Image: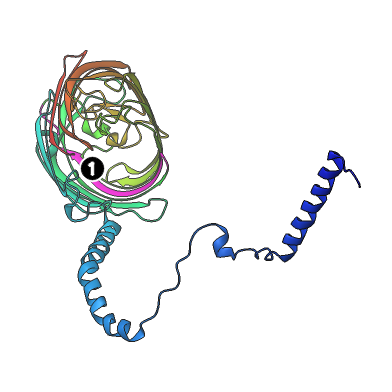
Amino acid sequence: MVIETPRIVRTRSLILATTVSMTTLAHADPEPATPPADQASGVAIAAPREHHRVANTLLAVPRIIVMVLLEGPRYAAGEVDDYLESRSPNAFGRDVKKQSWLFGATLEWQTALGTSLAVRLGRRLAYATSIDGYAGMFGARGQSGGLHANLGRYTAARIEPSLSFDAGRDLTRAFAGIGEHGPRATYDQQGMTVGAAVAAYAGPVQFAVRGSYDSTRAADPSSDFEYDPTMIVGFDERQRAGTGALAITLDTRHRSNRWIPKSAPSSGWLVRGEAAYTSGTASRTGDFELGRGTLEVRRLFDLFYGDRVLSIGASVEAITADAMEVPFERLPALGGRDRMRAFAMNELRDSEAAYSDIQYEWPLGVDLRSYLFVEAGHTDAWHGGYGGGLRYHTSSTIAARIQVAGSETGDLGVFFQLGAL
């Protein structure tokens, strides 16, 4: 009799269990193969749909009819919209924020020239394509009219060609000497100008080339004209001249906040330079030619969230010829509603002209702004001016404006605008 210890019993049981397990694995089913690729991700793939060729053929025609009835109007509207968008975002006046018809009028009064009136009517035809006509009367506007056409925008460079024509007679102008500012008198001007220009853009930079031909005559001096007309080049003689110019403008002006109208920028720079050449002939004094250079710089400072803006600007203009050897009306000049605003249009003349101003503006409402300015201009000597005004802004333009300016000589200039110019 053999007596087994507990250790021997446990060892025999382990050997038996191991044998049974190996026997079971040997008779078990083999390991399944790797699942197909379309099932490896765990996403169930539906079985292919059965094809009912006869039924599908019979239903094809009514299915197409239903699809056209339901989807056709949507596709047609999309095609029409693509066509209109290719012509202009505002084609046929679809954008109510940008009117297809534009109307504007100005009324000006200056101490030396009296009252003048002008009206303008414009029509937007397509994107960057428009035609504008104006007519003027009385004072500095005399009997005048003109047309200006923008001929669209082309290529990625945004090339914009334009044409212009201006003509007038009995245009009252002021003469106060050349260089030294002397006694002021008036005369009448008449003539016409035909011009063409092409502008292109590269970001905030604009390049413009312009050419023009003009035929003008200054005559009919007033009874208080204290100068000898025969000693003034260009006076009482017909002038014919052609001009070519190249201008480059950097304009980074922008609004600081989206609730401020786009037509009221509050920060940024405006830098503009132009070089021009004029060649012509005068009936009494003969041929003349001159080069002209212009530089203008303006900086806008946002003082408080775009509501309060400080604007500082300066410009200088000079010609290459002697002031006494070219027609006086082609000299650099100051005076009018934008530079030395109390003086008469182009009253201050010389071979060089410099200008600077400081303007501060603040809001009286969301769209209404007021402003004050001081300015100085130099031809023979420095002259000063001051004034202020109100402007009413829309999203894209100044719709109304009134401005009053005075000078150290006691002159007064009043300008009123209604409508888009």
| Residue 315 locus on image (x, y percent) | 36, 26
| Residue 178 locus on image (x, y percent) | 29, 26
Q: Amino acid at mark 1?
A: Glu
Query: Quick one: 269 or 93, which is closer to the camera?
Result: 93
Magenta span includes 207? yes
Q: Secondary structure at mark 1?
A: loop
> Which quadrant of the structure image shows residue 92?
bottom left
Most distant residue in the right direction: 1
Magenta span includes 71? no
Most distant residue in the front direction: 1
Q: Which residue is mark 1?
A: 237
Q: Please give the range of residues in magenta.
A: 203-223
Picture quarter with the C terminus: top left
In this figure, which colouring scheme has been used for the structure? Answer: rainbow
Q: Look at the image and tell me whether residue 213 can be seen.
A: yes
- Count of marks placed on residues: 1
Query: Quick one: 170 or 155, which is closer to the camera?
Result: 155
Residue 298 located left or right of residue 40: left
Query: Quick one: 36 or 262, which is closer to the camera?
Result: 36
Please determine whether, in this image, residue 364 is positioned above or below residue 232: above
Please determine whether, in this image, residue 290 is positioned above or below residue 306: below
| Residue 160 locus on image (x, y percent) | 34, 51
Residue 186 located left or right of residue 3: left
Please determine whether, in this image, residue 250 is positioned above or below residue 125: above
Type of secondary structure dominating the magenta stretch = strand
How dense is the environment of label 1, judged by Cα within 10 Å: few (below 14), some, or many (20 and up)? some
| Residue 325 locus on image (x, y percent) | 35, 35
Q: Look at the image and tell me whether residue 293 can be seen.
A: no
Please determine whether, in this image, residue 78 is positioned above or below residue 341: below
